[in-house]
Image (cartoon, grey):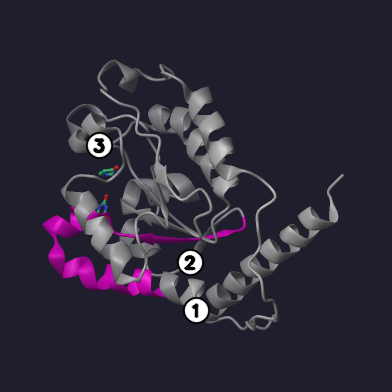
Amino acid sequence: MSTPVQKHNELNSLAESLKVHCRVQNLSGRTCFFRNTNQDGAPATEPTDKAALLEDLRTELGECTRCGLSAGRKSIVFGEGNPYARLVFVGEAPGADEDVQGRPFVGKAGQLLTRIIEAIKMGRSEVYIANVIKCRPPSNRDPAEDEIATCIPFLHRQLEIIQPQIICTLGRIAAQALLQTDAGITKLRGRFHRFGSIPVMPTYHPSYLLRTPARKKETWIDVQMIQEALR
Ligand code: URA
Ligand code: URA
C-alpha cells in the first residue's frame, strides 16, 4: 500500500517524465498530444532512497568473478554520480586510468566528456556515469559478447533504480548493447531511440572524438537535443 505522499510523488515524477516525453516527440518531428506546460509548483521528493538501492546493487556485484575480465582488472568501475540524475551517460568499459582509480571516465576521454556535459550547462555531479562493462578489457580490446551479456544486467538495474529521463550512450558498443541493434553509430546517432520507456540518444565516443575532432559538431547537435528535451 502506498501512502498519499508516495502517490503524490509518483504522480509528480510521472508528470516530469511526460513533459520530457513530449519534448522528445517534438524534437523527433512528431506532434505530442500532451502539452509541455508546467502546472506544478514544488519539486517532487522521491519515495525511495535511490542511493541506498545503488549501494545494495554494488554490494551484490561484490568482488565479481562472473566473467574472465576479473582476472586482469585492478578495480571494478561501478559508476558514479547523482542517484536522482535526469541524465545518465553510458560508456563502453573502463580504460587504464579508470581501472586504476575505480571511477568512470577520468582519463583523457573523461576530460572531454566533462566538457560535453558542461556544454549543456550541467555538471558531472548532476548526472550519472556508468559503463556497459565494469572491468577493463585487456589492452582496451572490444568487450566480447559473453562479457557484455554477463555484465549488462547490472547496468540495466542501475537504470531501473535511477530511472533517468534521458540516456546518452557513448560510442558504437554502448549504443548497440543497450538498444540491441547491429546498426552503426553513424546511423544511430542524432535521434532518440528507446530503452524501455526511456529515450536514448546515441552519440560518438569521446575517445573517437579525440581522434576525429571533425565529428565533434555532430555530438554537439546530439547533446543539444538532450538539453532541449530536459529543458
Ligand atoms: N571509456 C569508456 O567507455 N568508459 C570509461 O569509463 C572510460 C573510457
Ligand atoms: N566507432 C565507435 O566505436 N564509436 C564511435 O563513437 C565512432 C566510431
In the rendered image, is residue 115 in sight? yes
Kindly identify the residue that appears in the image at 33 percent across and 58 percent down.
185
Prevailing secondary structure class for the magenta stretch in the rendered image: helix
The numbered mark, 1 or 3, whose residue comes first in the sequence reads 1
Identity of the amino acid at label 3? Glu
Instruction: Tell me, yes or no, whether the two marked residues, 1 and 2, touch with CB atoms within 8 Å.
Output: yes
Kindly identify the residue that appears in the image at 87 percent across and 44 percent down.
1
Element marked by disc 3 = helix
Q: CA distance from mark 1 to mark 3?
A: 34 Å
The numbered mark, 1 or 2, whose residue comes first in the sequence reads 1
From the image, tell me which residue sits under label 3. Answer: 98
The numbered mark, 2 or 3, whose residue comes first in the sequence reads 3
The reply to whether the residue tagged 3 has its Cβ within 8 angstroms of ligand 1 is: yes
Q: CA distance from mark 1 to mark 2?
A: 9 Å
Identity of the amino acid at label 2? Phe
Q: Quadrant of residue 107 in the image?
A: top left
From the image, tell me which residue sits under label 2. Answer: 192
Q: Nearer the viewer, mark 2 or mark 3?
A: 3
Element marked by disc 2 = loop
Q: Is residue 151 above or below residue 125?
A: above
